[in-house]
Image (cartoon, grey):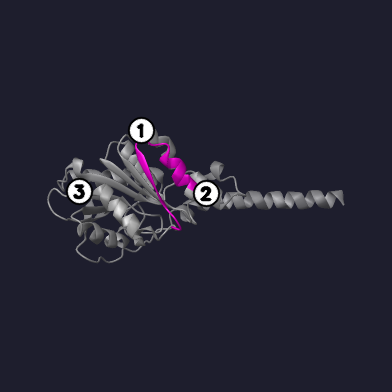
């Protein structure tokens, strides 16, 4: 009987380690499940190629207007955000969204370092060949993209920072989703926004729904306390993907982004 118990426990341990190994090897397929085919455009947005393999979505609302530079969620692509481009353009705000490596026709493989590098190249192209003054930039991130936006802010880009459904660090999200796995040991892409927040001095607005089923509400709350100048906007009953459908969220965002 004792031998059978030992064999059973060994089998469970081997199975558990096999699952851990599988999750480790496949983690980037889980974290970055982006579309591989580029979608078409709607409205007046255009694609602008950026050297070395990425591109951005661009909607120009006119000379001198603020420019929201958006970093999207992990299951999206920039072409999906033409709705935001038109929303902002109607308010006299230009819009750009930089594509991630490996997503929808962009070259390379997704990962924390490669996303940061592509974001930097996109911002350099926007403020270089495209002639956008750096003082016009407002950084925006949603879900996965909040980690990219925070790093760009830490690096000195942008004058304001908008974060929707953010997290403290990506392993905290993974640990909430898979509490039975040692996620914090397994994850290679950390996106440690809470550590970077201390180096961000610009005004920050964080928007998070209380019923977010993907990134726990408490993580957005915790992140807001790490910035020197952050306003936390709680959305009662808000979920992970419905914030832009809420007039109170749009109103708060526009009030933050539009020049005073």
Say whether disc 3 or disc 1 marks the residue closer to the N-terminus. Answer: 3
Q: Camera-side residue: 63 or 225?
A: 225
Is label 3 or label 2 in front?
3
For residue 40, which quarter of the picture?
bottom left
Q: Camera-side residue: 13 or 222?
A: 222
First to last magenta residue range: 218-238
> Percent x, y for residue 37?
34, 64
> Percent x, y for residue 154?
33, 36
Query: What numbered label is drawn on residue 33?
Result: none
Does 48 appear in magenta? no
User: Dot 2, crowdedness within 10 Å: few (<14), some or many (≥20)?
Assistant: some
Is residue 164 among the parts visible in the rendering? yes
Give the Cα separation between the discs numbered 1 and 2. Answer: 25 Å
| Residue at image mark 3 | 66
| Residue at image mark 2 | 174
Is label 1 or label 2 in front?
1
User: Dot 3, crowdedness within 10 Å: few (<14), some or many (≥20)?
Assistant: many
Query: What numbered label is drawn on residue 199?
Result: 1
Q: Camera-side residue: 11 or 40?
A: 40
Q: Quadrant of the C terminus?
A: top left
Figure check: 7 above or below 246: above
For residue 73, which quarter of the picture?
bottom left
Does 226 appear in magenta? yes
Is residue 51 among the parts visible in the rendering? no
């Amino acid at each position: 009987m004792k031998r059978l118990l030992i064999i059973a426990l060994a089998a469970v341990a081997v199975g558990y380690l096999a699952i851990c190994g599988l999750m480790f090897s496949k983690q980037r397929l889980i974290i970055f499940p982006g579309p591989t085919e580029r979608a078409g455009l709607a409205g007046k947005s255009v694609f602008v190629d950026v050297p070395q393999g990425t591109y951005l979505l661009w909607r120009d609302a006119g000379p001198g207007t603020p420019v929201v530079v958006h970093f999207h969620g992990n299951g999206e692509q920039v072409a999906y955000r033409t709705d935001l481009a038109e929303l902002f353009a109607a308010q006299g705000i230009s819009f750009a969204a930089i594509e991630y490596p490996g997503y929808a026709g962009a070259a390379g493989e997704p990962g924390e370092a490669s996303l940061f590098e592509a974001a930097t190249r996109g911002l350099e192209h926007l403020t270089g060949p495209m002639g956008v003054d750096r003082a016009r930039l407002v950084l925006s991130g949603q879900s996965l993209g909040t980690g990219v936006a925070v790093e760009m802010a830490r690096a000195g880009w942008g004058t304001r920072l908008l974060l929707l459904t953010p997290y403290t660090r990506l392993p905290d999200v993974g640990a909430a989703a898979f509490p039975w796995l040692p996620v914090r040991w397994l994850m290679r892409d950390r996106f440690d926004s809470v550590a970077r927040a201390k180096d961000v001095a610009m005004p920050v607005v964080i928007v998070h729904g209380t019923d977010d089923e993907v990134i726990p509400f408490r993580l957005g709350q915790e992140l807001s306390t790490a910035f020197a100048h952050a306003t936390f906007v709680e959305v009662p009953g808000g979920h992970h993907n419905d914030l832009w459908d809420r007039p109170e969220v749009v109103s708060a965002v526009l009030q933050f982004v539009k020049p005073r």
